[in-house]
Image (cartoon, helix red, strand yellow):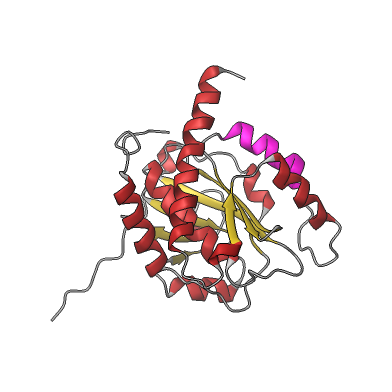
Amino acid sequence: MTDKKSNQPFTPADIKRLAKKIISENPIFIPDEPTTVGSPDNLTDEPEEPDNERPTKKEPERSKK
Amino acid sequence: MLATHIEAESRYESFRRMAREAIHKELPYGDSKNIRLSEISQNVLIFSKAWAADANRKVDWPWSEGYKSYAFRYPNRFELATWYGNSLVGLSLGRPSYAGTRLRLEFIEASPSHNPLRGRIVPITISVAELYANIIGASELRIIDPIDKKLIDYYSSFGYRYCDARAESNHKHYLVKVLL
């Protein structure tokens, strides 16, 4: 894998800020949480070829009126 | 084991530890002091064997054997063991894609019975995975085969987008979030 970004290490302050943001933007509890998500079968999938690695496009934000 | 492999394992474990520790510090629960997030060590694998005998278990996959080959193959993997007190209550694995542009969260398993963290295993795991993905420079997190419709609906309301099986070359459906 390319280490383009990971060669520019986050500072502890960056990590703390990101952790706060992630916790604030994600659920903290899921009612009826399943005991499994995904499957052990996924662990043996062949790695994706680089050509298939088109990043998912972010949904365009609607313009505010 | 080659020195480069050992170096990679050590380097990525330091990234995983950063993610675990930072998320743990921000957990918003009143009982966070009882929650511990760790790597998947030999001790964890011994504890995981108790799950195999549990009649409520949904899968038949031996963590102790399966983990070792996965870990050897992917030193840059995501892994997490979640504890409540002295009880192992969650395990998960994932890996970056070939070029590292995305992190695939491939399997999360919670303790099949008596889980005091029920309802919080998936949120904690996904939060640590998101931070790890950021640290290694991935631009998106994919939760492969989310299976449960309630889970899909729930995460879809928190910035994830559901993509059906036709969207990925190996025909897996997934939830995806584009990271900053």
Query: Which of B37/B94 is in front?
Result: B37
What residue lies at 70% left-to-right and 68% top-to-bottom? Answer: B115
What residue lies at 39% left-to-right and 58% top-to-bottom? Answer: A19
Q: Is residue A63 visible?
A: yes
State the image quarter where residue B101 is shown.
Answer: top left
Q: Is residue A18 above or below residue B118?
A: above
Residue B78 belongs to the span the image colors magenta: no
Which stretch did the figure color magenta? B62-74
Residue B70 belongs to the span the image colors magenta: yes
What residue lies at 30% left-to-right and 50% top-to-bottom? Answer: A14
Magenta segment's dominant SS is helix
User: Is residue A32 shown left or right of residue B9?
Assistant: right
State the image quarter where residue B114 is shown.
Answer: bottom right
The picture places residue B90, in percent across and down from the top left corner, at 65, 58
Query: Which of B108/B6 is in front?
Result: B6
Which quadrant of the rendered structure holds the C terminus of chain A?
bottom left
The picture places residue B163, in percent across and down from the top left corner, at 47, 63
User: Is residue B60 shown left or right of residue B102?
Assistant: right
User: Is residue B37 shown left or right of residue A63?
Assistant: right
Q: Is residue B167 visible?
A: no
State the image quarter where residue B34 is shown.
Answer: bottom right
The picture places residue B20, in percent across and down from the top left corner, at 49, 51
